[in-house]
Image (cartoon, rainbow, N blue to C red):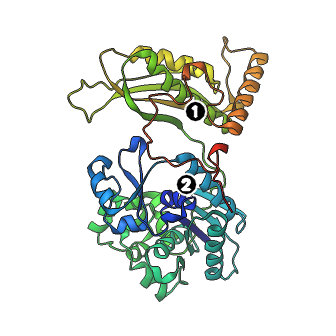
Amino acid sequence: MFALVDCNNFYASCERVFQPRLEGRPVVVLSNNDGCVIARSAEAKALGYEIGDAFHLILDRLKRDGVTVFSSNYTLYHDMSQRVQATLGLFAETLENYSIDECFLHFKPGADWGPLGREIKRTVRKHTGIPVCAGFGVTKVLAKLANRTAKKRPEHGGVFVVPDAGEARDAWLRTFAVGDVWGIGRQLSGRLQAAGVLTAYDLSRLSDTSARSMLTVVGARIVMELRGVACLQIEEIAPEKKGIGSAKSFGVPLEDLETLYEPLSAYVSRIAEKLRDQRSVCGHLRVFLETNPFVPSDPQYHPSTGCDLPTPTNYTPDLCTTAARLMQRIYRPGYRYKKVGVMALEIAPESDTQLSFDAPTPEEIDRRRRLMAVMDKLNREHGRGTIRVASAGERSPAWQMRQALRSPCFTTRWADIPEAAA
């Protein structure tokens, strides 16, 4: 048996955990630089707010409706996600962290799934303050649909178990449009509808030959999963990433090259940290710049360039030096730059690094690894950016994202820990 546990209105729920006065009140969370709405509480949804609503266009309406607005606080959301996952680990030995607010669980057969789901809901809420819904099915695709039922139909109390094979399951599958099925995107949905496949039940009845012809092997597995045949297993170890990137808009436009080095180095440092976390190195680095396309009166320029590294590495100073050279190659004065981005490509395991003739000596490589290990440890314990390369500039630079409405980092920063008075 599989279960998909999904956090309800996750970003908004994280904000409510430490501000209980917001319970039952409309809440929205904004994107980077407070640009647009990316998350809504149920109350905000009921008022008609949509994902993608531009903040500056709905500001007056938000005030009129009494909506509480937050800048995105990804440090808080990531930590709360880890706490939810740790709690779910009390119920199942095998987990797959599917996204920041969703987790697949795998169970051996034999439990009473409905009561188990309600116990999962109660425990996660008690341990973390986050409300969740749980859907159970004999395959991952069925569990995903079951979670949708648990979330969209209040009469189930946030828990739904897929009926056993037969008329009850067929009737339930008929309640979903084919586009609601996990893995069936807009393009495939249109193709299926043109062929008369309108519901999840219709998709489950598609012949094996037609499924492979219309949907490829991956789509054919989805069809099998709808029939109750498990083809998709829990991924206990995340697949290696083909690329790791970092690209953020600035709080204010930047024009001179020296100032652009600061966000560039900060983003490269974060990429290098991620590479070390997964014991990987990158063999190719790419840098791009962007002006603001939403200010058409400004001259526009969107260059990019990249290069292979002589020796694949995750050493922050070397990557920062290479990125700075790439920046020099594409920078042009006279533009107001809104974003810089970096992408690490050709990622491989650290243990498989092929050294070149001009590579550092083994002793120097060992020294660099120990240096980076100390830096990562200090940054984990005292906050990101505590130890950083000098080219990254100040810890709170003027160009950082606008986050005027961000809540404190309640769980990850000593100064932000809530105080209780008795």
Residue at the image point whose x is 63% and y is 53% from the top: 418
Q: For this rendering, which residue is in front, 258 or 324?
A: 258
Q: For this rendering, which residue is in front, 182 or 315?
A: 315
Q: What element does badge 1 sit on?
A: helix
Q: Is residue 22 left or right of residue 360?
A: left
Q: Look at label 1 and name its amino acid.
A: Arg
Question: Looking at the image, is 256 positioned above or below residue 91?
Answer: above
Residue picked out by circle 1: 270
Q: Earlier in the sequence, mark 1 or mark 2?
A: 2
Q: What element does badge 2 sit on?
A: loop
| Badge 1: residue crowd in 10 Å (few <14, some 14–19, many ≥20) | some
Q: For this rendering, which residue is in front, 239 or 216?
A: 239
Residue picked out by circle 2: 100
The percent position of residue 98, horizontal first and vertical second, equals 56, 57
Residue at the image point whose x is 59% and y is 70% from the top: 3
The percent position of residue 282, horizontal first and vertical second, equals 59, 29
Residue at the image point whose x is 44% and y is 82% from the top: 172
Is there any visible trace of residue 1 in the rendered image? Answer: no
Q: Look at label 2 and name its amino acid.
A: Ile
The percent position of residue 214, horizontal first and vertical second, equals 37, 61
